[in-house]
Every structure is written in C-alpha cells, then in structure tokens.
Image (cartoon, grey):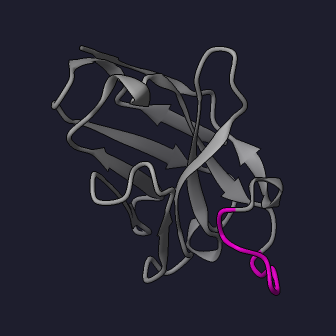
C-alpha cells in the first residue's frame, strides 16, 4: 500500500515536498517512482530512485528543479519540488516497481510500476 501526501496550492516559483509512505512489502528491495497526470493528458514519468537510493532518474522537464530521495528506515520516498511552474500542475502519484530487477529496462518505464498510491493534487498558480 502506498499513501502519498504533501500536495497543495502554491504560486509559481514556490516549493512543495511530497511524501509517500509504503507498507506491505520490503520497501528497500524496490525502486520507487513519481508520476503525474494533468487533466486530459496521459500519466507521465517524473522521477525515480533505485532501491538503495544511489540511482536516480528525472524527466527532462523537471531536471534541476525536482529531487527524489528515500528513507528506507522509514519506508518513505520523497519528491522535493522547487521553482514550480504552472505546467507542473497535476495529480502526482507515487509508485513501486513490481520486481526487484528488470534487465535492460529503464527505471522510468511506467509498465514496470505495479503498485500505485492514490495521488495528491499539486496546483501551481501563475
């Protein structure tokens, strides 16, 4: 089970920190990701982090502004979002990969994420 929180309304240029608490599986065994879905658009990859936290990957649109991290002792993954833009407005979902290893598959591949949180709304006003 994944429970996301931390969304809200913020002005352009502001910051938010999303959290996602996980339960039910050995958290430290699986990569975690954040995805987002804006109205009328498909759900898209935002950021991902490997099981140990050493490997991260970001969508080009958020590089340099967003930072993903995890605390395996607390079974929690975070998304620090800075310099927010109106284009970042979306429902943000945390997700967990289904398997520990995916040979030759990028960590950003949405189909490898099997468990999803309920989503948290982020709205950035101009």
Question: Residue 90, relative to residue 43: is it above or below?
Answer: above
Does 81 lie within the magenta span? Answer: no
Compare residues 123 and 12 and report the one nearer the observer. 12
- Residue shown at the point (41%, 30%) measured from the top left: 88
- Residue shown at the point (64%, 68%) measured from the top left: 26
Residue 121 x %, y %: 46, 20
Question: Residue 113, relative to residue 8: is it above or below?
Answer: below
Compare residues 56 and 59 and report the one nearer the observer. 59
53 vs 82, left or right, is right
How many marks overall? 0
Residue 5 quadrant? top left
Residue 71 x %, y %: 37, 65
122 vs 110, left or right, is left
Compare residues 36 and 41 and report the one nearer the observer. 41
Residue 114 x %, y %: 80, 51
Instruction: Name the image quarter holding the N terminus.
Output: top right
Residue 33 x %, y %: 58, 55
Question: Residue 42, relative to residue 126: is it above or below?
Answer: below
Q: Which residues are magenta?
A: 100-108
Residue 119 quadrant? top right
Question: Residue 40, relative to residue 1: is it above or below?
Answer: above
Does 106 lie within the magenta span? Answer: yes
Residue 28 quadrant? bottom right
Instruction: Name the image quarter holding the C terminus.
Output: top left
- Residue shown at the point (69%, 35%) measured from the top left: 43
Prevailing secondary structure class for the magenta stretch in the rendered image: loop
18 vs 99, left or right, is left
- Residue shown at the point (83%, 55%) measured from the top left: 111
């Amino acid at each position: 089970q994944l429970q996301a929180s931390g969304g809200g309304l913020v002005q352009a240029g502001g910051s938010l920190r999303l959290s996602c608490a996980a339960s039910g599986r050995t958290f430290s065994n699986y990569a975690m990701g954040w995805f987002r879905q804006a109205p009328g658009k498909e759900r898209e990859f935002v950021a991902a982090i490997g099981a140990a936290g050493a490997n991260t990957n970001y969508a080009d649109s958020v590089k340099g502004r967003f930072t993903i991290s995890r605390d395996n002792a607390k079974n929690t993954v975070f998304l620090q979002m800075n310099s927010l833009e109106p284009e970042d407005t979306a429902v943000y979902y945390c997700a967990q990969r289904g398997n520990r290893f995916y040979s030759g598959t990028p960590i950003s591949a949405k189909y490898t994420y099997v468990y999803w949180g309920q989503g948290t709304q982020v709205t950035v006003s101009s």
